[in-house]
Image (cartoon, grey):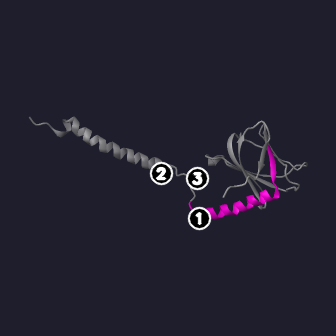
Amino acid sequence: MTTYWYKEPWAWLVFALPFSAVVAGIATYIIANHEPDPLVVGNYYKKGKAINLELSKIKLAQKLGMKFSLTLNDDELLIKPTGIEKEFSLLTVNFYHPTQEEKDFVLTLTPDGDGNFRHHLDHEVKGKWQITLSTFDDKWKIQNTIYLPQASAISIESEPKNS
């Protein structure tokens, strides 16, 4: 009695295992190339040189004693200069979300009559943020990680970086 190969269950098992590996490999390739990771820097050498320039701006902010106080109440952002005597015509505030690039935003603020910087946010800002403060001419820079919302004022100042 002769049986055909396609009627044998072991033949289908032998074919199914390599076929499932091929399907899984194609699915993995499609998933990996569907949305490339935007956090990876293409030209790391130029980025490294730019980081060194940024460190000099942070050190200048430390030397000048730049300190600010940030409060966020009912979507109104208030930034007060606390550790300096100078007044600024413009302050650039960058909010960077650690994982979702589309949530990042930049504010360019002018001082009110008291020398404080105010802005009414049109969207809710919650969670962990990397915040950067600098003047419009970008001579100094302060970077901090903050968590919003908070009940009290958040102190923003240059922290010494270990290098």
Classify 10 Å Cα crowding around label 3: few (below 14), some (14-19), many (20 and above): few
Return the x and y of residue 72 as percentages of the image width and height: 78, 40
Instruction: Tell me which corner region of the image, top left, top right, bottom left or bottom right, holds residue 61.
Output: bottom right
Question: Which residue type carries mark 2?
Answer: Asn
Question: Which residue type carries mark 3?
Answer: Leu
Most extreme residue toward the front is: 162
The answer to whether one can see residue 135 in this image is no
Q: Which of pointers 3 and 2 lies earlier in the amino acid sequence?
A: 2
Which residues lie in the magenta part? 42-70
Q: Is residue 63 above or below residue 126?
A: below
Query: Which mark is on residue 154?
Result: none
Distance Cα–Cα, label 1 vs label 3: 15 Å
- Helix, strand or loop at mark 1: helix
59, 11: nearer the viewer:
59
Q: Which residue is mark 2?
A: 33
Q: Is residue 59 above or below residue 150?
A: below
Q: Are marks 1 and 3 in contact (CB under 8 Å)?
A: no
Question: Which residue type carries mark 1?
Answer: Tyr
Q: Which residue is mark 1?
A: 45
Q: Residue at x 72, y 49 (%)?
A: 144
Query: Which mark is on residue 39?
Result: 3
For residue 119, side relative to residue 25 (left or right): right
How would you classify the magenta stretch by its main secondary structure? helix
Q: Residue at x 22, y 37 (%)?
A: 10
